[in-house]
Amino acid sequence: MEAATAQITPAPPSAPAPKAGAGWGSGGLSSEAARLRRRFPTVADLAAQARRRTPRFAYDFVAGGVGDDHGLARNRQALDAVQIVPRYGIDLRGVSTETTLFGRGYALPVGVAPMGLAGLLWPDADEAIAAAAQRARIPYVMSTVANSSIERIARIAPDVFWYQLYSVPENDHAVSLDLIRRAQAAGAHALVLTMDVPVRSKRVRDVRNGLVVPFRPTLRTAWDVARAPLWALAMLRRGQPRFRNFEPYLGPEASTGDLAGFVYQKMTGPLTWESVARFRDAWRGPLVVKGILHPDDADKAVSLGADGILVSNHGGRQFDAAPAAIDALPPIEERVRGRATVLVDGAMVSGLDLLRARKRGAAAAFAGRAFLMAYAAAGADGLDHVVRLFTEEFRTALIQSGTPFHDPVS
Ligand SMILES: Cc1cc2nc3c(=O)[nH]c(=O)nc-3n(C[C@H](O)[C@H](O)[C@H](O)COP(=O)(O)O)c2cc1C
């Protein structure tokens, strides 16, 4: 088990130095990066564009939460409520954003949270996001129900690849253990066990939109698709998203519907502590338990050999009464301090949010929707852009708040 550390080393300038006489402000720069910065200055701008380009049922599947979306809103409200008293008089212009997690160096304390069925928002999202994470040197957590395979993602993102497991209990976990074996063989750096889906949740927007996989056109969804012609074209070219990790268990002839049916029927039920102990034995490497909100559960996970705790309410998608992850974080960090690395996710959309997560006790934060929306809005360029937003804003927040990043997390 290794805790996260970070050092101050000179950071490369993130934007080209302006020429003398260029005037004040970056608005005049003509590079593609500058154009994206003007067009999408925040993640909210990217999400608005994603909404315009995609059918409603696809956008709602990603953006929505469970029930009345209270847990979803709470994540954002709680982050906004985190105040940081700035300290001045120190020169931190050379501050580095480098972060070490489980003995590996990353460029920034943010990673990509696992997202199943990401290919519904835009085809090939998993592989494009994994490639962007590799370029940016930030962790990429692949979902069990991604629309790519462990082996492909490992080739695309060899230096930043983590794997998230949803278990398949039947046959004494034969499939779960095989997925762990494949992740190990492919070189995943960390295994993330998601605990917070003991039962399928009621996502009201999906119910209302009649979401099914594979997609079956109805009058309403056909109208939705007609309003998103670029999405429809991309989907026609690439085919509907498949749960590719399960192809070896159903055979190459398995249809998209067969794979979806397998996931729906077999990948159910709680991940028990007994299973966590078994998976700990089966996995050689850092183990992260995700979806924890209670300090006793964090303690239990660490006692079973977890190296990391990812504090999360699943982006507000599982339990509408769950607290905001950022609020659940401090008592958990206090409980496992020195024994495990604490991570957090939920509504992270800016570099300031990353600083808030650090100040509350996380070694690093993860973001889901921010990356997926960026891809649906502007493709691979959108992904590089959102990484630049996180990087520049985080660096600015460190300097503005007077926080040398190597400060003990408090
Ligand atoms: C479309 C979508 C699919 C998700 N699928 C998974 C998944 O397969 N496994 C998992 O552990 N969490 C999953 N999550 C939860 C995320 O990993 C993460 O906890 C959450 O999205 C973080 O909040 P944010 O999207 O506001 O950043 C999913 C979230 C979204 C938005």
Image: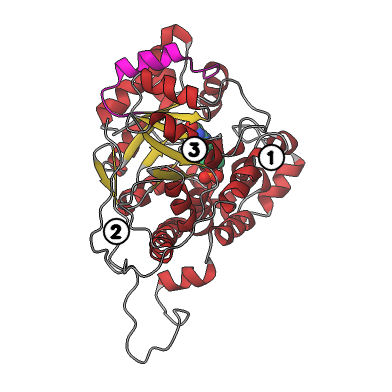
Question: In the image, residue 194 lies at what x, y percent?
Answer: 47, 27
Q: Nearer the viewer, residue 70 or 241?
A: 70
What is the spatial separation of the Cα atoms under label 3 and label 2, in whole angstroms? 24 Å
Instruction: Report which residue position mark 2 lands on.
Output: 96
Q: Nearer the viewer, residue 202 or 297?
A: 297
For the residue marked with disc 2, what is the amino acid? Answer: Ser
Q: Is there CB contact under 8 Å for labels 1 and 3? A: no
Question: Picture coordinates of residue 249 (x, y %)?
Answer: 41, 18
Instruction: Specify the quadrant of the image occupied by residue 363.
Output: top left
- Residue 115 visible in the shown view: no
Q: Position of residue 40 (x, y in %)?
A: 53, 65
Mark 3 surroundings: few (<14), some (14-19) or many (≥20) residues within 10 A: many
Element type at mark 1:
helix
- Mark 3 or 2: the one toward you: 3
Q: Which mark is residue 329?
A: 3
Q: Position of residue 14 (x, y in %)?
A: 33, 67
Q: Amino acid at mark 1?
A: His
- Whether disc 2's CB lies below 8 Å from ligand 1 is answered no
Q: What residue is rendered at 32% in x and 90% in y?
A: 20
Amino acid type for the residue under numbered disc 3: Leu
Q: Residues within 10 Å of mark 1 (few under 14, many from 20)?
A: some
Compared with residue 73, is residue 172 higher up or lower down, i.e. above or below? above
Q: Are marks 1 and 2 in contact (CB under 8 Å)?
A: no
Mark before the other along the chain sequence, 3 or 2: 2
How many labels sit on residues?
A: 3
Instruction: Give whichever of discs 1 and 3 has the lower sequence position.
Output: 1
Q: Residues within 10 Å of mark 2 (few under 14, many from 20)?
A: many
Q: Which residues are magenta?
A: 267-287
Q: Which residue was labeled with disc 1?
A: 70
Secondary element under disc 3, as helix, strand or loop, is helix
Label 1 to label 2, Cα distance in Å? 36 Å
Q: Per the image, is 258 magenta?
A: no
